[in-house]
Amino acid sequence: MPVYNFKQMAPVPSASDLVDIVLTRTQRRTPTVVHPGYKITRIRSFYIRKIKFTQQTISERLTAMLNDFPRLADIHPFYSDLCNTLYDRDHYKLALGQINTAKTLVDAVARDMIRMVKYGDSLYRCKCLKRAALGRMCTILKRQKASLSYLEEVRKHMSRLPALDPNTRTLLMCGLPNVGKSSFMNKITRASVDVQPYAFTTKSLFVGHTDYKYLRWQVIDTPGILDHPLEQRNTIEMQAITALAHLTCSVLYFMDISEQCGYTIEQQCNLFRSIQPLFANKQLVVVINKIDQQPWDTLESEKRAMIEELVKDSGSNTTMLQMSNISEEGVSQVKNTACDKLLAARVDSRVSGNKVDSVMNRLQVVYPTARDGITREAFIPESVLREREEHGGKKVIPKSRIGYAPTKDDDLDDGDETPVESDDEMVGGGGNGAASTGPRNKTARELMWENGGPGVWAPDYREQYDLADPEWRFDAIPQILDGKNIADYVDPDIDEKLRLLEEEEDQLQKEYEAANLERMNDDDSLDEMEKAAVGEIRDRVKIARTYKERPGGRNRPALPREIRGRAKDKHDDGAKLKASAIEKRMEKYGVDASQMIERGRKREREDSRSRRRRDDDKEMEDASPTRDGEEMRDGRGLSKGAVKRAKKERDESVKRERSLARSHSRPREPSQMGLKDKDAVKIAKKVEGLGQRKWAGGSGEGDQRKAVHLVKWMNTGKKRNGTHYCR
């Protein structure tokens, strides 16, 4: 099991703080503005969202709280019994159960109130239901005041518990108070336990760590135990009993033979016998402490025999050792013995288990067997033996210069700047056919270690150049030669590319001059006024193009087609797109707009004529027949039967309207809405639409607005004349 770290548990807020947290979060994370003019479905969803969000916030908080606290049935038995000893198992479970019940009740309240809000028919009723839902949830939380306070105290105490691993290698010290357990722990670990000359200085479990055989060991110091029945032991003593009962460890039972602790040796032996059942299946070390005050050899024979008999009766797992915390005599021996006994016991328990067989079956040790009786020695080539004889039995490898450019410190014969060992010299020993007499072909790894190792040696790739003369490979390449840059002549086709670029530039220049000449010829046929107009038009087109291509010109959206003809400013006559304004504006660009304006007027006349024709057709709908027995036609060319069918459809539509009006969602008559007739209904709908249009683009219900409110206590009550303090 892992090490339990109770320090990660989140603090448990009090009931009032939890209510403030929930309501503040609901106000901050949900919409805050709603108006009676909204549709009823929108109003319902507004308040349902608030109820749901409050319920979810409470559920998340309480669920996190329940998950943080450990379940006593799921954790190690040591921690389960320790929690029972410290906090009372029943009280602990009852508090967590009440929190779980509160979460269930909050969910039920939210579910019921949401069902009622769905049938709310006005903003006021929906708001009242929301207030009732939030109030009932907060009342449920306030009733958990005692449980939340108890759980917070438990959390604080559990966060101070040591991080103890119940399954690791552990040394556990026990005994009567003031026998030297804490002093021994301070000696062998890096812990700092308080040591005082009175009983029960240690009131809880303390954990330290030490190292032995490259392993980390856990050392636990327990409070003192008194010799009385289990039912009479207090919480401090029960912590030591719980550790002895559930931890697999090596137990160190301390005895003070000097009797300075206030208890006789007989009392210490009686305590050992009373808690001896807890030492079953554990490695036990009886530590005779304070031998600096009372040596073991000078101890009375009766007391010594009593202790020896106690150790003998406890079994073969018990060992007796002597030590002193003051002189540190025997401290290391006690620690090493306890650790060795526990290591041996752990190995034995694993070997005797069922898992060892599966591991041993997979292990196989192979020992090589002799193939025959012939002795085969190592083979060394003759060339190697000859080279060793020449150098007196030692292998001498001269430092290589392969891969490095020559320097001024190199000793080269006849002024040759080629390195001593080049690629030509390393191939086949110089061409004399004697591979053993020529220089050996060295690898890049050997060159690297000969010339400084990794990071120092760098290969010279010039030796791989394929030139006409191999001696040119290591020549320095100049940057300037005969006053010209060498890099300009690296490309052999640079002259051809330069010629193509010059020809392309001449061609573009000729095309540009031809275009200018053609435009000048066109301008020659115009008079001075036309040339001026053309120049002005070109300038305006250039300005318009520049304005359109500027970065800020694309930030404004284009006007929709249906409002392009509307006046954009009531006080600007030039902004109204009238015929005179259009003609005046187009004249600035030198365009004759008379035909365009005449075309627009003609279209307006045709539209008005078609509208009058439709009105006349409506008046002729109820045309009567002129001949008996003949099917007459109305002004639109409809027959008598068609007219009757149209009239029947209108009557049915009126009946359908009346049937729909009988439902609860629609009033039957305008008078039920407080209006006079249908015309008043139309006017009311128009006014309602205009009122809602004001909200388009403005602040909505999701905007967090903090308006300035007058403080009630500063603006109520009697006030005297003159200057006075606001309080």
Image (spheres, helix red, strand yellow):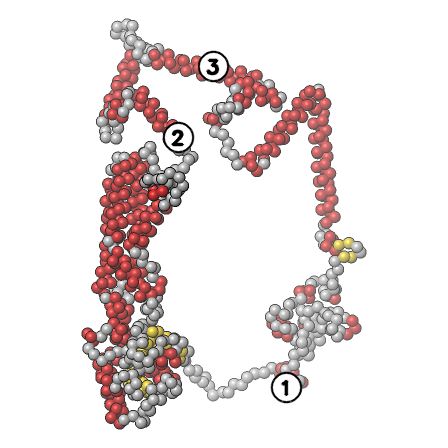
- For the point 39% across and 39% down, which residue is it? 722
Kind of residue sitting beneath label 2: Arg
Kindly report the distance in space between the C-alpha atoms of the residues bearing marks 3 and 2: 33 Å
Is residue 629 in view?
yes
Q: Nearer the viewer, residue 616 or 319?
A: 319
Q: In the rendering, at what x and y percent does residue 516 appear?
A: 71, 30
Q: Which mark is drawn over residue 605? A: 3
Against 48, is 617 above or below? Answer: above
Kind of residue sitting beneath label 1: Gly
Q: Is residue 169 left or right of residue 530?
A: left
Q: In the rendering, at what x and y percent does residue 132 appear?
A: 25, 44
Q: Which residue is mark 1?
A: 393
Q: Is residue 528 left or right of residue 307?
A: right
Instruction: Identify the element where label 1 is drawn.
Output: loop
Q: Residues within 10 Å of mark 1 (few under 14, many from 20)?
A: few
- For the point 35% across and 64% down, which residue is it? 7
Nearer mark to the viewer, of 3 and 2 = 2
Q: Residue furthest top?
A: 627
Q: Which residue is mark 2?
A: 693
